[in-house]
Amino acid sequence: MRTIPLKLCIACLSVLLGLTACDDSSGSKKSVAKPYLVFQADDGTHGRELWVTDGTAAGTKMLADINTTTSDADSGPGNFVSINGKTYFSADDGTHGPELWVTDGTENGTVMVKDINQTGTLHSNPEQFTVMSGSLYFAADDGVNGQALWVTDGTTDGTTLVKEINDSMTSNNLTNLTAMGASLFFSADDGTNGSELWTSDGTSDETGMLLDIYTSGSSSYPGNFVVMNDMLYFSVWDDDEGSMSSLWVTDGTADNTDKLSGIWDDNYDEIDYLTVSGDTIYFTADDGINGMELWSSNADGSTIQMVKDIYDGDSSYPEILTAANGLVYFIADDGTHGCELWVSDGTEDGTVMPLDINPSGNNYIFEYAAFGGKLYFTADDGTNGSELWVSDGTTTGTKMLLDINTTSLSANSDPSF
């Protein structure tokens, strides 16, 4: 049985922007027309910096070199999200560490919003960016309150702490931050109840644990939050089985938070990568018979099915599910082609590998972004290194968009969204 990395890390989140480019005939500002996709990449000269694309090779360019401490220093921008005509993200300018930044689509308009953690050499490491009711919420550590819930209106003074949850936890405490209507939902550990389901309306008084799923003090580790039809779906680790998990649903109240009825006679192993496309939830699971494969469910759980047994007799390990234009994209291994890009329309016949990108070996795809009805991703074809690719789900529409790092034939730009 071959082994591939599970739960590949997504360093950054994708965002489709609607920003107006600034017209500067002097050429002193770099700007891009709307809409566009923001990402980080390394051209081999400037390090990992802020890039943008409009979906064309000509419209793919570096927007700002944020970390100029050395010529090839990395700012590592990530966690991109759009709100009120601007893009917020985390970045390290080489002086303050990873902090909250914003761009209006121009080089001069790319600035740090606030140095949240000013306790010496530490940094706030903002992440989990989520828009709710016109405000941007995120997790950050100011060096005093641990990793806590924060909010910003885009100004220094308007970037404030919402609620301290556990001042002893400086990272990996507040996760899966997701908005549904006028409420936020997330997983957090207050130091007493373990990692459980929390909610917030954006105020300190109304931020708290929604339900202690496992009252024994152990953690239920809610994860994989997705919203469909005004309901929040998420996975929960089983308290007794350890490696088993189940699918849960909530309408935002404790009384109506429960295991999804109609699906699970028994728990399935490692439910992961929940993704919504239309009125269907897609996820990966192991039923104990077919290995880890792609599954789907309707809203109430009355219809659940394995979409396709991609690797007959073993696990195909589908990962990083992303929906775009009615299709679900993911990485999987059919036992013949290695790890490659796959796409599904929800049917067995419509679940296919559009292209064997790297015929000579595995093509580990670590980064996905849905943009303009297509999928943009990082791939290595065995010749050009890890570069920016695009797919519309067809063989002819799956291709390298641009070889960003041309310092050598196989040099990697490693785009991250």
Image: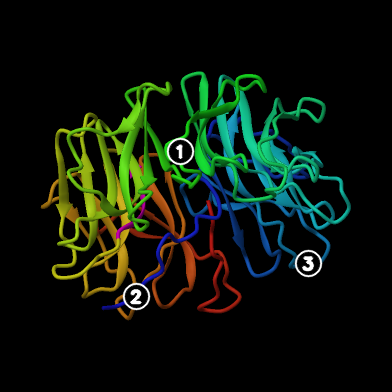
Q: Which of disc 2 and disc 3 is earlier in sequence?
A: 2
Res. 242 image quadrant: bottom left
Q: Position of residue 296 (x, y in %)?
A: 21, 43
The answer to whether the residues at label 3 and label 2 have Cβ atoms under 8 Å apart is no
Q: Main secondary structure of the magenta part?
A: strand
Marks 1 and 2, the one that precedes in the sequence: 2
Q: Residue 5: horizontal and vertical position, in percent?
A: 41, 68
* Mark closer to the chain start, 3 or 1: 3
Which three-letter amino acid code belongs to the residue tagged 1?
A: Thr
Relative side of 274 to 89, left or right: left
Mark 2 = which residue?
3
Q: Which is closer to the viewer, label 3 or label 2?
A: 2
Residue 317, numbered label: none
Task: Tell me where residue 19 sits by quadrant.
Answer: top right
Whole-angstrom CA distance, mark 3 to mark 1, is: 53 Å
Which structural element holds mark 1? loop
91 or 209, nearer to the observer: 209
Identify the magenta region.
318-323
Determine which residue is flagged by label 1. Answer: 215
Residue at horizontal 29 percent and vertical 73 percent from the top: 338
Q: Residue at x 81, y 30 (%)?
A: 156
Q: Nearer the viewer, residue 307 or 44?
A: 307
Residue type for callout 2: Thr
The local secondary structure at tag 3 comes to loop
